[in-house]
Image (cartoon, helix red, strand yellow):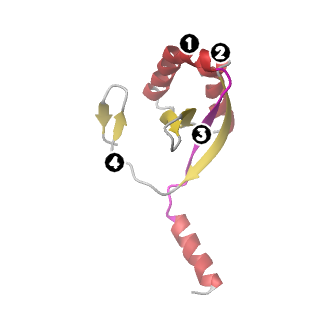
Amino acid sequence: MDTVNQIDAIEAIKAKMLKTSFYAMFRTLKDPAKMQAGRLEHLQWLLDLEKRDLIFASGPLVRRDGSTDPGLTIFRVASYADAEKLALEDPFVVQGAVSFEIRGWPFGIGRINLSLDFSDQTYGFR
């Protein structure tokens, strides 16, 4: 397939994609002692965001050796500013346990058939 046909084929595929964006919060550990002290408040904050439909997913990041990083939260919001506002409310951030970086995550490939809140095992179809 020549270059022009490849570009046309790529554009045809992309035109059908969902075209939605999420924003990912990557946490970096600053103070391990503060992480442990703030864990309950952090989980309660995440549960509140989950119930308000403001997060797609959240959890620690695990290395091949089994060690973990403070984690990743993917916000379901309209802008970087909205994501940063939520990130600044994270008890881990407020207490100085972690720093963070926000990155946009535009995507158009994947599948979701039902909603499932892992925390309390509630589910729904949408």
Mark 1 falls on what kind of element? helix
Q: Residues within 10 Å of mark 3 (few under 14, many from 20)?
A: many
Looking at the picture, tell me which residue is in the foreground, 49 or 98: 98
Q: Seen from this angle, which residue lies furthest front?
A: 65
The amino acid type found where label 4 is placed reads Asn
- Label 3 to label 2: alpha-carbon separation: 20 Å
Q: Say which residue label 1 marks.
A: 37
Looking at the picture, tell me which residue is in the foreground, 61 or 109: 61
The amino acid type found where label 1 is placed reads Ala
- The disc, 4 or 3, on the residue closer to the chain's N-terminal end is 3
Residue 72 image position (x, y, % from top left): 56, 36
- The residue at 66%/17% (across/down) is 94
The amino acid type found where label 2 is placed reads Gln
Q: Residues within 10 Å of mark 2 (few under 14, many from 20)?
A: some
Residue 5 image position (x, y, % from top left): 59, 83
- Residues marked 2 and 1 touching at CB (< 8 Å): yes
Q: Quadrant of the N terminus?
A: bottom right
- Residues marked 2 and 4 touching at CB (< 8 Å): no
Q: Which mark is residue 24?
A: 3
Magenta residues, start to end? 16-31
Residue 11 image position (x, y, % from top left): 58, 71
User: Would you say residue 17 sits in the magenta stretch?
Assistant: yes
Q: Quadrant of the C terminus?
A: top left
Q: Seen from this angle, which residue lies furthest bottom?
A: 2
